Every structure is written in structure tokens, then in C-alpha cells.
Amino acid sequence: MLGELRRAITTGRLRPGTPIRQDALAEELQVSRVPLREALKTLEAEGLVTYKPHKGYCVAMLSLDDLREVYRIRELLEEEAVRAAVARLTDADLGRIEAAQEEVERAAAAGDVAAMATANRTFHMTLFDCAAMPRLARLIRTLWDTTDAYRSMYYGDAGNRERVVKEHRAALDALRRRSADEAVSTLNVHRDRAVAELEPLLDA
């Protein structure tokens, strides 16, 4: 149930700012209120929902400052992960990243926003996992969770989907050549452009 709730938020099915009606949600998930409350407390600790007395829970909304902070921390952590991953990267690892990219491209071509968001995350997390630093990977995943709902929203634009595909291809090219510097640089540009696309959503 916790995983299902987290996915509903990070995929944008429950959009930022949406009030969470516990009775309706408990009925939908076919669970009692007690485990649902525990799940919501966990999501609150992760920053995915907020609680206000007399109002209840709602899906968390980020401010522009929140967004910039999250992406700045991601930049620092992900550079470490990418450099460590490139140093250890095997052909089998590269094959898994390429397979994830194939899914990204299929979803982009089909205009399947949910599949694109899932495949994009798989592409990046597969790379980070190659660093063999599980604590670092968990921290990065938690940061991704806080912005995934917004990311799903801008995948609705065909131009954004095309841009992501091209940037992933450039990153893959750097990875094939085991160029850590170029991989980091390419992914930094990729991340910065994502911030530029997300900012108007938060400033609306």
C-alpha cells in the first residue's frame, strides 16, 4: 500500500496540492484507516505529503526555492555516483542502461507520459546503481521522489520528450567511451534543462 501511494504521487496521478481524503482512499485501496495513516506518516517524513491540523493530508507542493535546492543537492550526489559508476562500468551494465533508453524512446514516440517517466527513472537509476554505493543511490532516489510528479507533468509536451531522448543519447555516448567528465557534463546540462522546464509549473 505504501508503494502504491508513493507511485500515485510520483507519477502525478495524485497531483501536487491534492487533498488526500482518507475515507475514500482507504476504500479504494481496501485497507483500514490505521495502516493508511501509518503510510501517510511515512510519506510525510519523505516530504511527499504534508499535514495540517483540522485540514488533514495533502500532496506536497514544492516552492521554487525547494526545487532549486533539491536539484542542487542532486547535482552534487549524482556527480559522485556517475564518476563511481563509470569507473566500474561493464559491458553488461551498459547493456542494461541501453535497454532502459530503448524504453524511454518507445514511450516518447508513443506519447505515453507514465511509461516515459518510469523508463526515464530506470535509465538514471540503473546508472547510479552501477556505482555500487547503495546508500548514495537511496539518497538520490528520495530526492527524485520529491519532484517526480512535476516531471511527469512536463513529459506531456512532445518537445520535452524529444529533448530528453537526445540528451540521454549524448550521455550514453559518453558512457560508452567511459568518459566520466563528459558524462557528468552532459547529465548536468540535462538536469539544468529539466529545472528550467519545471520552474514555470511551480511559479504558476
Image (cartoon, rainbow, N blue to C red):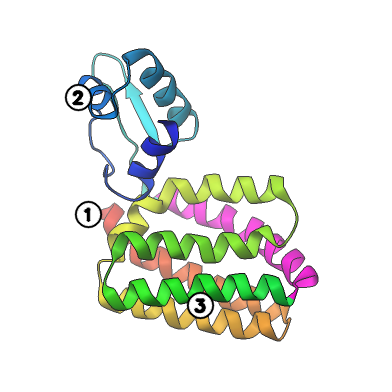
Name the residue that disc number 1 marks: 204
Residue at position x 55%, y 56% in the image: 72
Q: Is residue 101 above or below residue 137?
A: below
Residue 157 percent across, percent down from the top left: 25, 71
Name the residue that disc number 2 marks: 24
Question: What type is the residue that disc 2 sits on?
Answer: Ala
Residue 180 percent across, percent down from the top left: 72, 76
Q: Are marks 3 and 2 in contact (CB under 8 Å)?
A: no
Label 1 to label 2: alpha-carbon separation: 29 Å
Residue 7 percent across, percent down from the top left: 39, 44
| N-terminal-most mark, 3 or 1 | 3
Q: Is residue 153 above or below residue 108?
A: above
Task: Indicate the secondary structure of the residue bearing disc 1.
Answer: loop
| N-terminal-most mark, 3 or 2 | 2
Mark identifier at residue 168: 3
> Dot 3 surroundings within 10 Å: few (below 14), some, or many (20 or more)?
many
Question: What type is the residue that disc 1 sits on?
Answer: Ala
Is residue 178 visible to the viewer in this orientation of the structure? yes
Residue 184 percent across, percent down from the top left: 64, 73
Q: Which quadrant of the view contains residue 26?
A: top left
Q: Nearer the viewer, mark 3 or mark 1?
A: 3
